[in-house]
Amino acid sequence: MEEEEAELRNPFPSPPSHYTNYTTHNLDLLKLLKERVDDGDVSQVNQHEVLSDQTDVPDWPLTQLERPRVDWIREEGAWTVFGDTWPIEERHATLAELGMTQLYPSDPNIDRRPALLTVLKSMLVTYSHMLNGLLAPPPTTTSSNLPEEWRRHTEWIGTMSLNLTAAANELRPVQARGNLELMMRRQLGLRREETQSIHAKCDELEAKLSQLSGSALEASKGYDDAEEGSTSTEAIQVEGLAGATVCPFHLSAKKRLFIDYTSRLLLLPR
């Protein structure tokens, strides 16, 4: 028993010892037991008598393999695991619930800024009084039973510090939402900048392609004009049946094929 309690207090406890009981065979036996005991309570029957035709029926009750009752957990509002009780709706206990002095309102719907500002001012004043207490002469014999002034101020500063820390921790969800909103806005701005740079690059490429296309058209037009001028001045001689055809190399391929085809037609016998 002491070993189990020590294991529960371990920050990293081992799995429960009965986890090895959750085998396929044992789960099938539990299912069969529920089918054979329809109306009665499964925990009140003798599982060895009901499952007498089955093999390897364990000595421990099969009802231990049943899942936890969720409705019971909801009724109690908490569940127990590894010796600790955890509520269904996780919430942090207030300073008043922990038995400490709470200097700000517990209702989160009330604005706590005035109260926290008052706590902060009181802390500064108390710190000044504590310094004065440290500089004061030692107490006399008549006032030795009274608590020292600096000690009282130190305890009060500790109480106010706990209040400021607790109030700041309760604002963690609000801070997380604010940080998430800021991060999303930053990502949106970066994406807009990247989109604008992409559009600018596309416009630059489009202008470059238009310039290259115009240059290519001008070069092609000049080449066609030069080709037409050279072909008009060339002498294409087609002689008789035994004649030869002069086809300069600077002529286009289509024109050479046309001249060759015409020459063959002239050479055919009639």
Image (cartoon, rainbow, N blue to C red):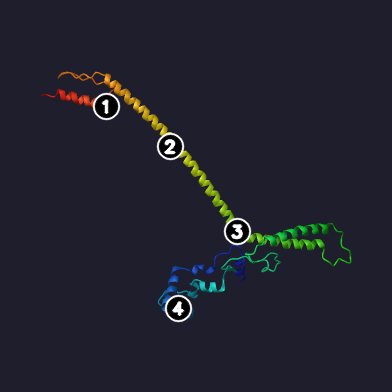
| Residue at image point 34% right, 27% down | 221
Q: Nearer the viewer, mark 4 or mark 1?
A: 1
Q: Secondary structure at mark 1?
A: helix
Q: Give the labeled residue for mark 2.
A: 206
Q: Nearer the viewer, mark 4 or mark 3?
A: 3
> In the figure, is residue 21 to the left or right of 255?
right
Q: Nearer the viewer, mark 2 or mark 4?
A: 2
In the rendered structure, which disc, 3 or 2, sits on the residue that comes first in sequence?
3
| Residue at image point 17% right, 24% down | 264
In the rendered structure, which disc, 4 or 1, sits on the residue that comes first in sequence?
4
Count neighbours of disc 2 (C-alpha within 10 A) and say few if under 14, some if 14 to 19, many if 20 or more.
few
| Residue at image point 23% right, 26% down | 257
Distance (Cα) linking label 3 and label 1: 80 Å
Q: Secondary structure at mark 3?
A: helix
User: What x and y, as percent, mark residue 92?
Assistant: 62, 65
Q: Which mark is residue 253?
A: 1
Q: Amino acid at mark 1?
A: Ala
In the rendered structure, which disc, 2 or 4, sits on the residue that comes first in sequence?
4
Q: Give the labeled residue for mark 3.
A: 174
Distance (Cα) linking label 2 and label 4: 85 Å
> In the figure, is residue 255 to the left or right of 122?
left
Q: Give the labeled residue for mark 4.
A: 48
Contact (CB < 8 A) between labels 2 and 4? Answer: no
Count neighbours of disc 4 (C-alpha within 10 A) and say few if under 14, some if 14 to 19, many if 20 or more.
some
In the rendered structure, which disc, 3 or 1, sits on the residue that comes first in sequence?
3
Contact (CB < 8 A) between labels 2 and 1? Answer: no
Q: Nearer the viewer, mark 3 or mark 2?
A: 2
Distance (Cα) linking label 4 and label 1: 101 Å
Could you say which is closer to the camera, residue 41 or residue 255? Answer: 255
In the rendered structure, which disc, 4 or 3, sits on the residue that comes first in sequence?
4
